[in-house]
Amino acid sequence: MTEEFTAAAVTRRGFTTMAVSALAAALAPRAAAAPVARRDDGLRGAASPRPPGVDRPRPTPAQLQWQRDEFALFLHFGVNTFTDREWGDGREDPAIFTPRALDARQWARVARDAGARALILTAKHHDGFCLWPTATTRHSVASSPWRAGRGDVVRECVDAAREFGLRVGLYCSPWDRNAPAYGDSPRYNDMYVAQLTELLTQYGEIAEVWFDGANGEGPNGKRQVYDWPRIWGTVRRLQPEAVIFSDAGPDVRWIGNETGSAGDPNWSTVNPAIVTAPGVDGPEIIRSLQHGDRDGTVWRPGETDVSIRPGWFCHPAEDAKVKSVDALMRIWFQSVGRNSKLLLNVPPNRDGLLADADVGRLQEFRAARDALFARELPPLAWNWRATAGPRLEGIAVLPAPASIGVVRLAEEIEHGQRVARYRLEGDSGDGLWRPLATGQTIGYCKLDRVELAPPVRRVRLVVDEIIDPLSAVTVRLFVSP
Ligand code: FUL
């Protein structure tokens, strides 16, 4: 492991250049606007806080689908797997890429069995080595001995994912430490768009395109100025149903850290004037990424990416450092349970397989979730009423007294995110309401653990603060295992 690993793990940002001003002309508006939703087309520019009740942002069908998947696996794989590094410098010999037993069907099977619904592969990391036989550079699998230079990891991954019913996302690093054109901005933008064009036209439907925020030097210290409007516009044109991920969305935003923890609260709405391009940094930016903006004018939910290992790539020396089930469960509650989506990195090893340690841990993680959510109370008949102020209260009677272990709350996010503060209370039969859980916003999913609660006969959800009228919240109650 080299020193750079530590640096990479601490901050993914390095240096960034950007074409912020060009964002105003960002993306061609999507042809057929979704019936329920408006996509941030990047054309609105700086936004002022939205007055209450006016045009609350809502998800597009693609954003809804993305969120409902809840859990995806991230696959960091490439020359770093063979050099034991986290950031390659672009001078790696393609001959080192020799995964002798690569089996993308194993990746997909393990992902499906773990409960993931999508896979995202690093088609190109910062070293510039392409996992598909691109026409844009010789720095690719085509120059490696793997499958006699006729292999295509992207193809194998995409085919396997589809066979196992998973959606596919692709990570194609903007930062490229191999490309001679890097830093010669128009020339590299052409090359990068050509790479995306290959990826988005040759592999069928791509559900997510992942634009990383880490960025650095070009040859001779040159800095690259990215043409984000053109880059994102290329994705819109070629894969109109794909969601675009980056710090600045426009569809899905980075959650602001790599530790597996969304902010609490976590709004899916943001003010697009705060994070304007991938890789920008600063306390206000990190706050907006972590928490979203309650009065934000666009829908841009947060994706929580974290690795099951200390590094993003597989290093045999870290086989014993795969995160524990407890750590993964904490991450689940802090990502999926905080209105985010979990993108858990499980990197293939030098054989081209997910390592036994990771596979075993994923199975245990799945089993732990299944056990925790095994005993759901049947849907209760809720009696909802609006109370004084902008409040809502619902009461339900349980069929028999039960100890609640976990509560799963959900708003109908098709209509936006509206809850700003709530409390769940239980009555054990003496008519007194005792607290079970409290929180701020809910969104698509809020998970609360209930500690040491006595059996309850009735439950009450009080929404103390809402930002738009609301008639109900979905409450699912799971009995302690
Ligand atoms: C970061 C990169 O620098 C890491 O290598 C990794 O790909 C992570 C997901 O994003 O910005």
Image (tube, rainbow, N blue to C red):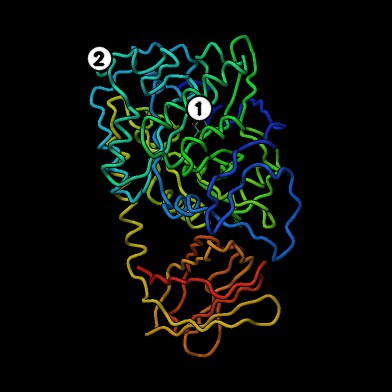
Q: Measuring 39% from the left and 11% from the top, which residue is drawn there? A: 93
In this orientation, which residue lies closer to the viewer: 480 or 153?
A: 153
- Indicate the amino acid at tag 1: Ser
Q: Is the residue marked 2 within 8 Å of ligand 1, measured from its CB?
A: no
- Indicate the amino acid at tag 2: Ala
Mark pair 1, 2: CA separation: 25 Å
On the question of residue 338 being in view, the answer is yes
Q: Secondary structure at mark 2?
A: helix
* Residue, far front: 31
The location of residue 19, given as percent across then percent down, is 68, 28
Q: Is residue 54 above or below residue 436?
A: above
Q: Measuring 39% from the left and 37% from the top, which residue is drawn there? A: 321
Q: Is the residue marked 1 within 8 Å of ligand 1, measured from its CB?
A: yes
Say the numbered circle drawn on residue 103. none
- Rendered image quadrant of residue 138: top left
- Rendered image quadrant of residue 204: top left
Quadrant showing the N terminus: top left
Q: Is residue 4 left or right of residue 183?
A: left
All told, the count of numbered labels is 2
Quadrant showing the C terminus: bottom left
The location of residue 312, given as percent across then percent down, is 44, 32
The location of residue 325, given as percent across then percent down, is 37, 50
On the question of residue 256 being in view, the answer is no
Say the numbered circle drawn on residue 173. 1
The location of residue 149, given as percent across then percent down, is 29, 15
State the residue position of label 2.
148
Q: Measuring 32% from the left and 49% from the top, which residue is drawn there? A: 114
Q: Secondary structure at mark 1?
A: loop
Q: Is residue 473 above or below residue 7?
A: below
**Marks 1 and 2, the one that precedes in the sequence:** 2
